[in-house]
Image (cartoon, helix red, strand yellow):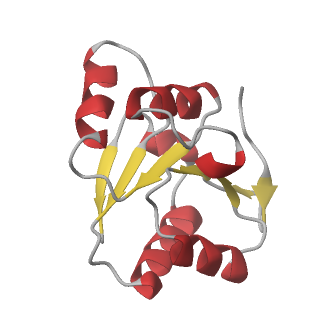
Amino acid sequence: MTNTRTVGFGLTMLHFLSDENFTGGIINGLLHHWPSLDLVRVQDIGLMEEDDPAILEWAANHNLIVLTHDRATMPDFAYERIVAGRQMAGLFVFTNRISIGQAIDDLLLLDECSEQSEWLNQVVYLPL
């Protein structure tokens, strides 16, 4: 599945899946500042109790960059996917200590200044 929705001046927007431990305040703030942001929550699609590999697989099948605070296990599973030659749209790993405002600013900046394809098979630690 390819997501190529365009916004603004013909720029494509990033597409995200937040895992169950991603801060709701960040999600609410993102959607308040950018209502058209393409963001899906695992809670909304029946993946709340799924393990990390299943979430990464679902996100890869739907071309969604995963948003998480899980620094303990999610990056390891993402790297295992990459080494095994199984693509993923990307993984953005946020520290738990990031402020809601900084997380929103970082994600909006990444959305405005990059293309979905730039994050293919990338694990990125935030804040920037």
Residue 50 vs residue 13: left or right? left
Q: Nearer the viewer, residue 8 or 125?
A: 125
Q: Nearer the viewer, residue 71 or 36?
A: 71
Q: Vertical placement of 59 versus 94: above or below?
A: above
Residue 46 vs residue 121: left or right? right
Which residue is located at x 34 percent, y 40 percent? 122
Q: Vertical placement of 97 versus 85: above or below?
A: below
| Residue 111 figure quarter | bottom right
| Residue 68 figure quarter | bottom left
Image quarter (top left, top right, bottom left or bottom right) of the C terminus: bottom left
Which residue is located at x 32 percent, y 32 percent? 78
Q: Nearer the viewer, residue 48 or 5?
A: 48
Across and down, in percent, residue 113 comes to: 52, 65
Asked whether residue 103 is in view, the answer is yes
Across and down, in percent, residue 20 comes to: 50, 53
Across and down, in percent, residue 19 comes to: 49, 50
Across and down, in percent, residue 57 comes to: 50, 25
Which residue is located at x 65 percent, y 32 percent? 62
Q: Vertical placement of 68 versus 42: above or below?
A: below
Q: How many callouts does the rendering have?
A: 0
Asked whether residue 128 is in view, the answer is no
